[in-house]
Amino acid sequence: MKKIIISCLLILCGIAGIAQNANDALRYSSISYNGTARFMGLSGAYGAVGADFSSLSQNPAGIALYRKSEFTITPGIFSSVTESKFFDGKNTDSRTVMNIQNLGMVFGLNLNKGDKGGLIKGLQFGFGMNRMNDFANRVTISGFNTSSSLLTTYMNDANSSGLLPSDLGSNDFGYQKFSSLLAYKTDLLFYDTTSKSYGVDMPNGKVLQTKTIESLGSSHEMLLSGGANFGDKFYIGASMGFPSIRYEEESQYSEKDVQHLNNYFDSFTRSEYLTTKGSGFNFKFGFIYKPVEFIRIGAAFHTPTTYNLTDTYSAKMTSAFDQASGLSATSPDGTYDYRLTTPMRILGSVAVIIGKIGLVSADYEYVDYSTSRFRADDYTFFDENNTIQNTLTSANNLRFGTEWKYGVFAFRAGTSFYGSPYKNETTRGARMIYSGGIGIHEQNYSLDFAFSHQLSKDDYYLYDSSLVSAAKITSSSNQFLMTLGMRF
């Protein structure tokens, strides 16, 4: 029964929500590596640089380059702007939130300074939090569809089920409580006793379709990390990560007969509410090696993260007619517990350190999104995982950054490219990030600022992709960060 419920919800609701699918897997598998302003100023190209708390989530060997203990806190402002194109409609919407990008403490213990003593020069321990992703967004999609309606999917599903109206929403077909049954209760879906089939007023579209999606939330990672410095040449580190997810989405979809082609139907609105919460675990290990004083080479491995997640969801539909009063129907509250395993990651890095003047660094990251998997105790997720495997692919991510110092001031810039996670795609889902920053570093404290700008494009289907064309989405986001660091 659970297989029927989830599969049909995927068909009826597209990528909109209230069912687990490839878009959910991708949302929680994609990482932007947020953190301190210094880290963000270099676009996260920090795998071989080290001595920054953000590196504990990327290459934990960076903790071994700390010479002193340090506390950092990073408040920030995140703003997203989304443009959509759907048939003849173009829309722009935005959202802005404040957050904490980083909060952490590192304790450094110098065992043997200079050339004296044994092989181990220092031991380090750190704990705290780095934010991985922000989900704050607001999207508006609108256009005149001349080929289909969302109600078409409800009609097709009700007819294929062979159920009488009195059986819609029965235990074996409980998913109908969130879809066809709502349409039937609001007179948007009707049953013809002569033909013994369901129908809707405008199955071929010719309606103005509008959808707004508002989302909030984030993913962040609590960390316990340790590292060691061997002879000021070889640095190792490991992190236990405890990531958590909070995602909230509220959407409203409507269709309206703006050309008055039907004498009865006027419009309807469907609202959906989805909340996803959960936590997981991963392990990271890395090293940094200095073959010569001015070159650092780093590498890191991240195990897959396994999340235990819970979805809570509900839906509501209202109708309006030209010659009758409108109706309203609300689904019950739904909830579902499941697990999501996100991909492992492999990172390679190199940095050129130009004395105390500056540095240039580069990172490469490999991640295979097609290895994401959903699991549950009462459902196999065979079809959903098969879709993930056939739709998503591996991506190559590149990050470049540079920093130059003048007295107590440091000036930073960086850029990064995250490859498309989709098969047979080059730009869809790919992300470009440009960043810059400035910092003031004294002996016992630092104050850093950074600005980051991200661009991406993707497709969004309002419902069944075999019936409706994709809305083309262009997204951009801006982050402004400030990090206060205190060393002792």
Image (cartoon, helix red, strand yellow):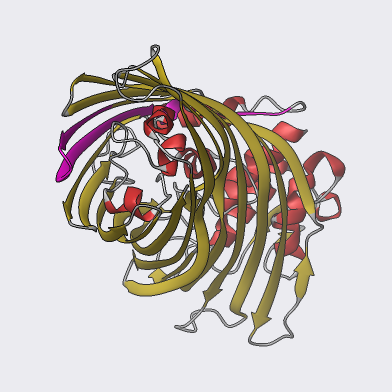
Which quarter of the figure is the N terminus placed in?
top right
Position of 305 with respect to 140 (left or right) is right
Q: Is residue 214 positioned above or below 441 on the image?
A: below
The answer to whether residue 31 of the structure is visible from this angle is no
All told, the count of numbered labels is 0
Position of 319 with respect to 201 (left or right) is right
Pinpoint residue 89: horizontal percent, then vertical percent. Answer: 34, 73
Position of 221 with respect to 273 (left or right) is left
Pinpoint residue 62: horizontal percent, then vertical percent. Answer: 38, 32
- Most extreme residue toward the front, as rendered? 116
Decide whether the magenta segment is chiefly helix, strand or loop: strand
Is 373 within the magenta? yes
Q: Nearer the viewer, residue 213 or 172?
A: 213
The image quadrant of residue 445 is bottom left
Pinpoint residue 5: horizontal percent, then vertical percent. Answer: 72, 40
Pinpoint residue 464: horizontal percent, then vertical percent. Answer: 50, 49
Is 91 within the magenta? no
Q: Is residue 294 positioned above or below 467 on the image?
A: above
Q: Residue at x 26, y 59 (%)?
A: 437
Which contiguous range is marked in magenta? 349-376
Q: Residue at x 52, y 27 (%)?
A: 226
Q: Nearer the viewer, residue 476 or 126?
A: 126
Q: Residue at x 52, y 59 (%)?
A: 100
Position of 109 with respect to 19 (left or right) is left
Q: Nearer the viewer, residue 151 or 386?
A: 386
The image quadrant of residue 140 is bottom left
The answer to whether residue 354 of the structure is visible from this angle is yes
